Image (spheres, grey):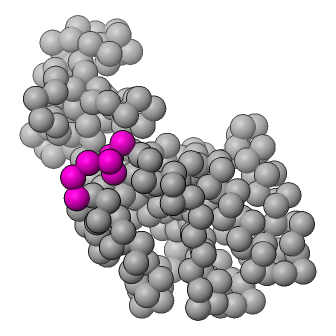
């Protein structure tokens, strides 16, 4: 993939995350300062390679799971560094957790609740043998999950997250499972972003969010990783 194709893919992903409708060549042409024909030619190549797709008869394109994976793999440590805006989010998580330092379960629930408010996704965490979830209304209000069978696929994923986490025990401080990469509910169109941390309950406790693949990945990954790191430090 050329640098321009990478940039176009990133622009499609970021525009689609913001507006939730397929992204057309006219929008991208204005962004890149080239002709619509040039953008359409590059989009054809990206589509042939499986990074984007054209839903139904729309003139615009949306990213595929493969396209999202390339984008996420390109997110660097610099991209995940705190910004002033993210610092406010981090402080919100810390304030909620610090108010419950004598109760590990309440601290973890507080961190999840903060992630729900900051990312507008469903938040979840393992607390011993219990799975705590909040923000299910956020998840099922997303346009991706209002039609077809995706609601059932997401529900299947939710039903099986806790046993899957116990069995697979993802070992990275930050794990991102995009769409079909999820262990169950592969057709759900959902992304699971999970941080592993040590707690009084387990050396493999998890906190994270579940939302559509249409996601502000850098922001969400920053917040989830910060929540896990901060919980481990406090608990």
Count of marks, rendered view:
0
Q: Image quadrant of residue 195?
A: bottom right
Question: Residue 33 magenta-drawn?
Answer: no
Q: Quadrant of the C terminus?
A: bottom right
Instruction: Tell me the residue at 51%/80% (across/down).
Output: 171
Task: Residue 35: tell me if it is visible.
Answer: yes
16 relative position to 53: left or right: right
Question: Residue 148 magenta-drawn?
Answer: yes
Instruction: Tell me the residue at 18%/15% (across/down).
Output: 38
Whether residue 36 is situated above or below residue 77 in the rendered picture: above
203 relative position to 12: left or right: right
Q: Nearer the viewer, residue 150 or 55?
A: 150
Residue 60 image point, x, y percent: 21, 26
Residue 35 image point, x, y percent: 23, 8
Q: Nearer the viewer, residue 234 or 34?
A: 234
229 relative position to 9: left or right: right
The segment highlighted magenta reads 143-149
Instruction: Tell me the residue at 37%/34% (across/down).
Output: 20
Residue 224 image point, x, y percent: 61, 60
């Amino acid at each position: 993939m050329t640098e321009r194709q990478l940039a176009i893919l990133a622009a499609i992903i970021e525009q689609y995350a913001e507006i939730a409708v397929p992204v057309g060549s006219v929008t991208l042409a204005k962004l890149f300062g080239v002709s619509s024909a040039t953008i359409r030619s590059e989009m054809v190549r990206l589509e042939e390679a499986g990074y984007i797709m054209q839903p139904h008869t729309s003139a615009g394109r949306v990213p595929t799971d493969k396209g999202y994976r390339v984008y996420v793999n390109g997110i660097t440590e610099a991209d995940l560094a705190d910004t002033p805006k993210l610092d406010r989010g981090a402080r919100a998580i810390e304030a909620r957790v610090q108010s419950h330092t004598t109760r590990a379960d309440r601290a973890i629930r507080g961190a999840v609740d903060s992630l729900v408010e900051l990312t507008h996704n469903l938040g979840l965490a393992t607390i011993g043998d219990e799975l705590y979830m909040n923000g299910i209304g956020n998840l099922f209000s997303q346009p991706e999950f209002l039609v077809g069978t995706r609601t059932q696929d997401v529900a299947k994923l939710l039903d099986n997250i806790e046993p899957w986490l116990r069995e697979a025990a993802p070992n990275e401080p930050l794990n991102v499972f995009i769409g079909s990469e999820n262990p169950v509910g592969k057709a759900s169109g959902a992304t699971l972003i999970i941080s592993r941390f040590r707690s009084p309950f387990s050396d493999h406790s998890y906190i994270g969010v579940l939302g559509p693949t249409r996601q502000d990945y850098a922001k969400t990954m920053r917040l989830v990783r910060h929540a896990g790191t901060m919980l481990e430090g406090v608990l």
